[in-house]
Image (cartoon, rainbow, N blue to C red):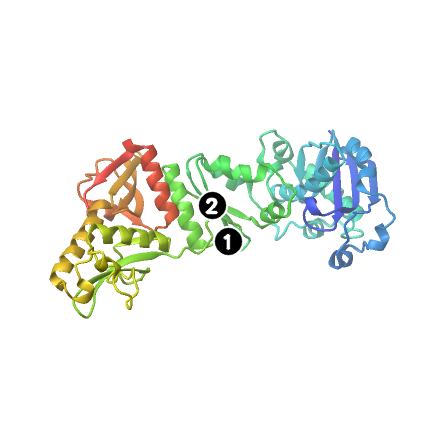
Amino acid sequence: MLYAIIDIETTGGFAAANGITEIAVFITDGKKVTREFHTLLNPVYTIPKYIETLTGITNEMVEYERDFKSIADELYELLQDKIFVAHNVNFDYSFVKYHLAQSGYELNCKKLCTIRLGRQIIPGLKGYGLEKICRHLGIKIEDRHRAKGDAAATVKLFHHLLQSDTDGHVKMMLKAKSKEQFLPPNIPASEIKKIPSNPGVYYFHDKKGKVIYVGKAKNLAKRVNSHFSNNKSNKQKQEFLKKIYHITYQETATELMAFILESIEIKKLWPEQNRSQKRFEPVYGMYSFEDSRGYLRLCIEKKKKNLKALYTFNQLTEGFTMLRQLMHTFELCPKLCFLQAEKVECQQLLENKCKGACVQKESAGEYNARVQKCIQHLENELPSFALVDDGLEPGEQSCVLIEKGRFYGMGYLSAHTDFEGMENIKYSLTPYAENEYIRGMVFQYAERYPYKKIMLNN
């Protein structure tokens, strides 16, 4: 078995918009080096100042060097039947694979990461960067941050790891189904192996434990692995992978519950890597109050924390549309519903559709009776129902509750729960803040699976 130990220097952190300035390849049989390849390259892209300072490779040094395409044929022949080895292998592999593809070659190699191998074979070190692990092993790095110097040190490191691998970690990592080949360097494979194949929500954490991404899945194990199995060369994917250090998850009994929980967690945690559902959603409510003349008035306002709304809306237009419908149905005054300006003569009164509450021709008692009927109608018309499905454990069932048209919460109930008492059900569930997205999902699900829906009395 032959290994290609590789190190590259680049103009930036991701392959799709950066070039390679230097590449070094050492072919080894695991004991001795049998072939070397090293060259500077014209990256086509400008080398930023901070990278010039780090590597010592300047734009002037590579101006007249050959470009990657001119070495693509030789490099492909050198790598195609070898095990691709590097310190943080997915970085080097993504660059080499991308630039070979741009030159018309499709590279598909098995990979080994000396960071991941180091964690397995020499556990307990404070860090596994090339400098730290080499210092621990007494390996001197000549010409640090240059491809040839770093690759030569990685060869010595790799030879040491092979000799110390009494538990067969290299063999395990090279198996076709091994996750070690495609996982980023900072994620323990043991965490991936623990993830179940059930529905749920998963969390990616950074080095400090902060949640940077939340996702939902019908199959947690399959979905989490899919993040790492395709090593895209764009900046967003590469930056994303570098930040992940730990993975946690919450199982749910159903896919619907996973969708709901994901939305709740994104709104609560506001993870930096999530794009969707991260927008401010103004919530409005329909309220009733009694004015100084004793007339009950309906209005649409931004949702108040300490006042119970008759109904909530995510869009102002949605609220006014419903209020106009109620106004016509119950012959309410548009001015008392704030649908017409105070100083303008009541349009409904001119058309004999308003009974004159706005000019006190109708008493507060008569008018308020119709407002109360309107409120009662609103409460009766808004559905209350439970979506019931299998639970996480035997003898229980999952429940998603809609109360008076609004998402109340979800959780798990005994399989023998009596659905006659709303309060009894609510007591066993976890209430959550609702939003239009969750409400829409639940109603769509109820329409798709009517046999899972249990209507409840308001």
Q: Residue at x 41, y 37 (%)?
A: 199
Task: Mark 1 or mark 2: name the one nearer the start of the chain.
Answer: 1
197, 312: nearer the viewer = 312
Mark 2 burial class by Cα count in 10 Å: few <14, some 14-19, many 20+: some
Give SS at disc 2: strand
Give SS at disc 1: loop
Give the percent coordinates (x, y) of residue 445: 35, 37
Which residue is denoted by mark 1 in the rendering?
209
Does the image show residue 357? Answer: yes
Q: CA distance from mark 1 to mark 2?
A: 10 Å
Whether residue 125 sits left or right of residue 253 in the image: it is right
175, 400: nearer the viewer = 400
Q: Residue at x 22, y 39 (%)?
A: 455
Q: Residue at x 31, y 43 (%)?
A: 411
231, 281: nearer the viewer = 281
User: Given the image, on which type of amino acid does mark 1 rest?
Assistant: Gly
Choose top left, top right, bottom left or bottom right for residue 93: top right
Residue most toward the front? Answer: 350
Above or below, comparing residue 282 to residue 34 in the picture: below
Whether residue 119 sits left or right of residue 429 in the image: it is right
Above or below, comparing residue 238 to residue 103 in the picture: below
Q: Are marks 1 and 2 in contact (CB under 8 Å)?
A: no
User: Given the image, on which type of amino acid does mark 2 rest?
Assistant: Thr
Which residue is denoted by mark 2 in the rendering?
248
Q: Residue at x 13, y 57 (%)?
A: 369
Give the percent coordinates (x, y) of residue 213: 50, 49
Give the percent coordinates (x, y) of residue 241: 59, 46
Does the image show residue 30? Answer: no
